[in-house]
Image (cartoon, helix red, strand yellow):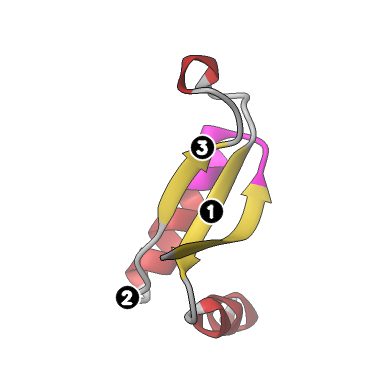
């Protein structure tokens, strides 16, 4: 099960956060807020982390 951790306003930013979290060993999924047909570089994306591991993502953010 996945839970939303963060929202970002571009695909590039979403991929950047994904690389940061996965570089620390935390799996991440990126989901578009809208329909898959609306997927573009300027769409809003959700950064999803495994449920129960939100504290790990918060700790990674604190380290930055």
Picture quadrant where residue 58 is located: bottom right
What kind of element bears circle 2?
A: loop
Give how far apart the Cα atoms at labels 3 and 2 are. Answer: 20 Å
Numbered label attached to residue 12: 3
In percent of the image, x 55 and y 17: which residue is there?
38
Crowding near pointer 1: few (<14 within 10 Å), some, many (20+)? many
Numbered label attached to residue 25: 2
What kind of element bears circle 1?
A: strand
Rendered location of residue 56, percent (x, y): 50, 83
Which stretch is magenta? 8-14
Rendered location of residue 63, percent (x, y): 58, 83
Give how far apart the Cα atoms at labels 3 and 1 are. Answer: 12 Å
Is residue 9 a member of the stretch shown in magenta?
Answer: yes
Is residue 16 a member of the stretch shown in magenta?
Answer: no
In percent of the image, x 40 and y 60: which residue is there?
28
- Tell me which label, 3 or 1, sits earlier in the chain: 3
Horizontally, is 16 left or right of 7 in the view?
Answer: left
Whether residues under marks 3 and 2 lie with C-beta atoms below 8 angstroms apart, the answer is: no
Q: Give the label, 3 or 2, closer to the camera.
A: 2
14, above or below 58, in the image: above
In percent of the image, x 55 and y 77: which residue is there?
54
């Amino acid at each position: 099960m996945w839970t939303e951790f963060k929202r970002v306003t571009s695909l590039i930013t979403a991929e950047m956060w994904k690389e940061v979290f996965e570089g620390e060993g935390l799996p991440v999924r990126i989901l578009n807020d809208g329909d898959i047909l609306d997927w573009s570089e300027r769409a809003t994306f959700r950064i999803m982390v495994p449920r129960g591991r939100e504290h790990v993502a918060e700790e990674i953010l604190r380290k930055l």
